[in-house]
Image (spheres, grey):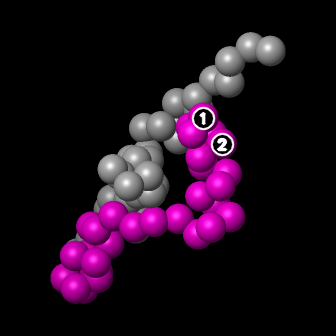
Amino acid sequence: MPKMKTDRGAAKRVKLTGTGRLRRRQQNRSHLLEKKRSVRTRRLSRETGFSPGDERRVKRMLGI
């Protein structure tokens, strides 16, 4: 059986923490920031996790 290949698109977007959790950036932070509240843009700049179903799928894409 050949090795599983890592999905490079997923690998560039997801970071693995020391405890094994997956972190990702949030959407809606790239453009049209003038009309968004400062509180909202600060909140969107933080990294967040995945829902349990998505986390399982992303781990498979990363070969974890």
Which residue is at 52% across, 30% downward?
Answer: 8
Task: Identify whether 5 is placed above or below 47.
Answer: above
Kind of residue at badge 2: Arg
Taking the view exactly as shown, the residue that stands out farthest to the right is: 1
Residue 4 in view (yes/no): yes
Q: Is residue 42 magenta?
A: yes
Q: Are marks 2 and 1 in contact (CB under 8 Å)?
A: yes
Which residue is at 33% across, 50% downward?
Answer: 18
Q: Please rate how many residues cluster around mark 2, counting C-alpha atoms within 10 Å: few if below 14, some from 14 to 19, many from 20.
A: some
Which residue is at 60% across, 49% downward?
Answer: 58
How far is disc 2 from disc 1 in space, using C-alphas? 5 Å
Which residue in the protein does label 2 denote? Answer: 60
Mark count: 2
Q: Which residues are magenta?
A: 35-64
Give residue 33's position: percent from left, percent from top.
26, 71
Give residue 42's position: percent from left, percent from top.
22, 76
Task: Identify whether 14 is placed above or below 52.
Answer: above
Give residue 11's position: percent from left, percent from top.
47, 37
The foreground one among 41 and 35 is: 41
* SS assignment for the magenta stretch, majority: helix
The foreground one among 4 and 39 is: 4
Q: Please rate how many residues cluster around mark 1, counting C-alpha atoms within 10 Å: few if below 14, some from 14 to 19, many from 20.
A: few
Residue 54 is tagged as none
Residue 27 in view (yes/no): no
Q: Is residue 5 magenta?
A: no
Write down the quadrant of residue 60 in the picture.
top right
Task: Identify whether 41 is placed above or below 13.
Answer: below
Taking the view exactly as shown, the residue that stands out farthest to the top is: 2
Quarter that holds the C terminus: top right
Which type of secondary structure does the marked residue at label 1 adopt? loop
Residue 63 is tagged as 1
